[in-house]
Amino acid sequence: MINFYSENEFILKNEAAFSNWIKGVIQSEGKKLEEISYIFCNDDYLHKINLEYLDHDTYTDIISFDNTLGNLLQGDIFISTERVAENAKEFNVDFDEELKRVIIHGILHLIGYKDKTESESALMRQKENEKIELFHVEQ
């Protein structure tokens, strides 16, 4: 099950298409879906979570809490839509493309991909691009 919640004014359009895409990505990596919740919020909301749970005093676009058991993916993924909008401007892409990247970035973390080193980041970016392409194929 995939849940979408909003702690700000953001409303995800076409939740069914996003759910189907995310499920397809999970399957493409040989994993199974238990329950994943996306919580869309603003910078301040996510900053508080970052401070409280991770002891990081920074703004970020995404925080994933991984409760995966073996191949059963489960977790909570918090996304700052304000940060996504800023990143979209900075990287000169539209909001929807950046949102897809961040949404799937969270799933890739739950699957087990990391992005702490340069080589891990390069693989993460490659996987993000590959999985974003799946969104267009399935529609």
Image (cartoon, rainbow, N blue to C red):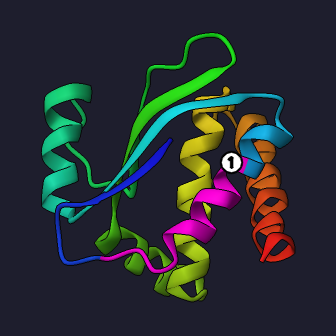
Q: Quadrant for the C terminus, please.
A: bottom right
Task: Look at the image and tell me whether residue 26 can be seen.
Answer: yes
Mark 1: give few (<14), some (14-19) or many (20+) Cα within 10 Å.
some
Give the residues in magenta: 11-23
Looking at the picture, how far across and down is residue 105, in whole percent?
60, 50
Looking at the picture, how far across and down is residue 7, in whole percent?
17, 61
Mark 1 is on which residue type?
Answer: Lys
Q: Viewed as shown, does residue 74 lie left or right of 4?
A: right
What residue appears at the point 82 percent right and 53 percent down from the top-left corner? 126
> Quick check: is 33 in the magenta stretch?
no
Q: In the displayed structure, would residue 77 be above or below residue 117?
A: below
Quadrant housing residue 125: bottom right
Looking at the picture, how far across and down is residue 90, in whole percent?
50, 81
Q: In the displayed structure, would residue 104 be above or below residue 99?
A: above
> Quick check: is 22 in the magenta stretch?
yes
Classify mark 1: helix, strand or loop.
helix
Q: Which of 7 and 85 is in front in this view?
A: 7
Q: In the displayed structure, would residue 45 be above or below residue 83?
A: above
What residue appears at the point 82 percent right and 35 percent down from the top-left corner? 29
Looking at the picture, how far across and down is residue 24, in whole percent?
76, 50
> Can you identify the residue that label 1 sits on?
23
What residue appears at the point 17 percent right and 70 percent down from the top-left corner? 8
Quadrant housing residue 70: top right
Task: Look at the image and tell me whether residue 116 can be seen.
Answer: no
